[in-house]
Amino acid sequence: MPMITVDGVVLRDGKILLIRRSTSPYVGYWALPGGFVELGETVEEAVAREVKEETDLTCVPAGLVGVYSDPKRDPRGHTITIVYVLKIAGGVARKTAEASEVRYFDFDELPEKIAFDHERIICDARKFM
């Protein structure tokens, strides 16, 4: 059975926020902040929680980027991710236990090593600029 995940697109000054993963898979790769939906929470609650855990930012969903369901998108198994563009409600982006680095990138100057299918998602997120 597929697992449900969420990813957050946080934009600031025309840049997108990425985290450097400190957990498997893709340790050291850059990714959108996100993770698994927990039992009993909505996907909107999950994306806000995951972004807070990984960046220390408090955010609220502002729009749906898309749903990504390629069975091969995650080496841990079939995951379906729901991706939201988020509005920052408070805090300052900083590294956490789950992210060894947090940085805003220009869409035209993305890092080489991007985890999962997040490069495709980032391209789709440009419409929110």
Image (spheres, helix red, strand yellow):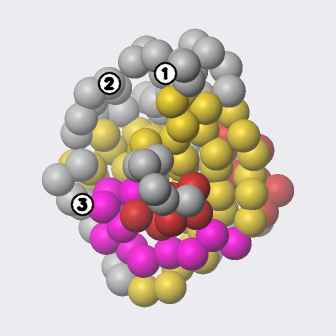
Q: Secondary structure at mark 2?
A: loop
On the rendered structure, is 10 left or right of 70?
A: left
Q: Quadrant of the C terminus?
A: bottom right
- What residue did someone put label 1 on? 74
CA–CA distance in space, label 1 to label 2 = 9 Å
Q: At which x and y percent is residue 93?
A: 35, 71
CA–CA distance in space, label 2 to label 3 = 18 Å
- What residue did someone put label 2 on? 25
Rendered view: 60 above or below 72: below
Q: Which residues are magenta?
A: 50-62
Rendered view: 14 above or below 96: below
Q: Do residues under tags 2 and 3 come within 8 Å of each other at their CB atoms?
A: no
Q: Amino acid at mark 1?
A: Asp
- Residue at x 39% of width, y 73% of height: 57
Q: Secondary structure at mark 1?
A: loop
Q: Quadrant of the N terminus?
A: top right
Q: Amino acid at mark 2?
A: Pro
Among all residues in the image, which is located at the extreme front? 40
